[in-house]
Amino acid sequence: MGFKHVAIIMDGNGRWAKAQHQQRTFGHLQGSEKVREIAIAANDIGIEVLTLYAFSTENWKRPKEEVDYLMKLPDVFFNKFLKELMAKNIRIQTIGELEAFPDSTRQVLERAIQTTSKNTGMILCFAMNYGGQREIILAAQKYHEAVVNGIINKDLSPEIFEQFLMTKDYHAVDLCIRTSGEQRLSNFLLWQLAYAELIFEALPWPELTGDHFKELVLDATKRDRRFGGL
Ligand code: V0D
């Protein structure tokens, strides 16, 4: 039973850089190279959606220079890797409230989404200015609006509520991996992780390899998933 949707909290980039007497931004750049390697590995093993936590709603609290650097990373990433993503038939998508990003960053994202929109392979979904609680509040507001407008009735179920989440087009998350040793969800995909397998990997994100990633996914696939049944 192969996994369809894998999500990753790409933690440990700043700490990894500091450990080698480098700036945190160097860790972020190295981290974006890893996005390429892990996306290709995920595509190799037939994963349909890979959702990566690239920027949380909390990340705005970081020093301005670091935030400014992160805003430029999507452009750096696409200039280096867009050709390769096209060759691998990978589609770029995003979840999160992109309105908060500078126009320049949003234009880069829009162009990448457009350029890859006809690809039919794996979806590489970047969660940007994303927070799980915020997503659920927005979904509740949209649901309420739909009820007020008489578009749907008041019977609410998980299946109906999910249609108002940012991930409505994706399969449920099968596995979430967090690198760098912390064992928390940190407001990532709260609803979607209800039945997901969890892996807390000690290695920091820049040190994960494609082969190691494939091994983690394979190990999790072997777990017996009962979804609360017997
Ligand atoms: C920094 C480790 C790729 C986590 C990975 C703006 C923190 C490297 C992207 C990216 C970030 C995002 C969207 C897109 C193409 C690439 C990225 C951010 C941070 C936040 F369409 N890496 N990356 N975006 N890091």
Image (tube, helix red, strand yellow):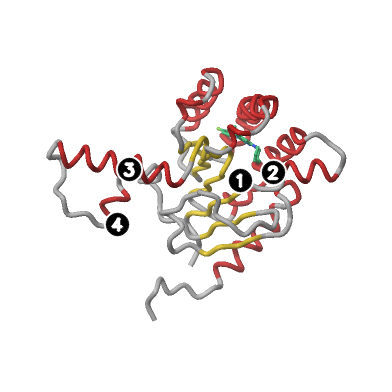
The tag on residue 158 is 4
Residue at 59% of width from left, 56% of height from top? 177
Residue at the spot of label 2: 34
Q: Nearer the viewer, mark 1 or mark 3?
A: 3
Q: CA distance from mark 4 to mark 2?
A: 34 Å
Q: Secondary structure at mark 1?
A: helix
Q: Which residue is mark 3?
A: 139
Q: Earlier in the sequence, mark 1 or mark 3?
A: 1
Q: Earlier in the sequence, mark 4 or mark 2?
A: 2
Query: As drawn, which residue projects farthest toward the right?
Result: 21
Local secondary structure at mark 4: helix
* The furthest residue to the top: 103
Q: Is mark 2 within 8 Å of ligand 1?
A: yes
Would you say the residues marked 3 and 2 are in contact, meaning their CB atoms lie under 8 Å apart?
A: no
x and y percentages locating residue 36 in the rendered image: 65, 41
Q: Nearer the viewer, residue 144 or 105?
A: 144
Query: Any atom of ligand 1 within 8 Å of the CB at mark 4?
Result: no
For marks 1 and 4 on the same chain, the one whose residue lies earlier in the sequence:
1
Q: Position of residue 189 (x, y in %)?
A: 47, 50
Q: Amino acid at mark 1?
A: Ala
Query: Contact (CB < 8 A) between labels 4 and 2?
Result: no
Q: In what quadrant does ligand 1 lie?
A: top right
Q: Badge 4, how many Cα within 10 Å: few under 14, some, many 20+? A: few
The picture places residue 219, in percent across and down from the top left corner, at: 61, 68
Graded by Cα atoms within 10 Å as few (under 14), some (14 to 19) or many (20 or more), the crowding at tag 1 reads many
Query: In which quadrant will I find the C terminus?
Result: bottom left
The three-letter code of the residue at mark 3 reads: Ala
Q: Which residue is mark 1?
A: 39
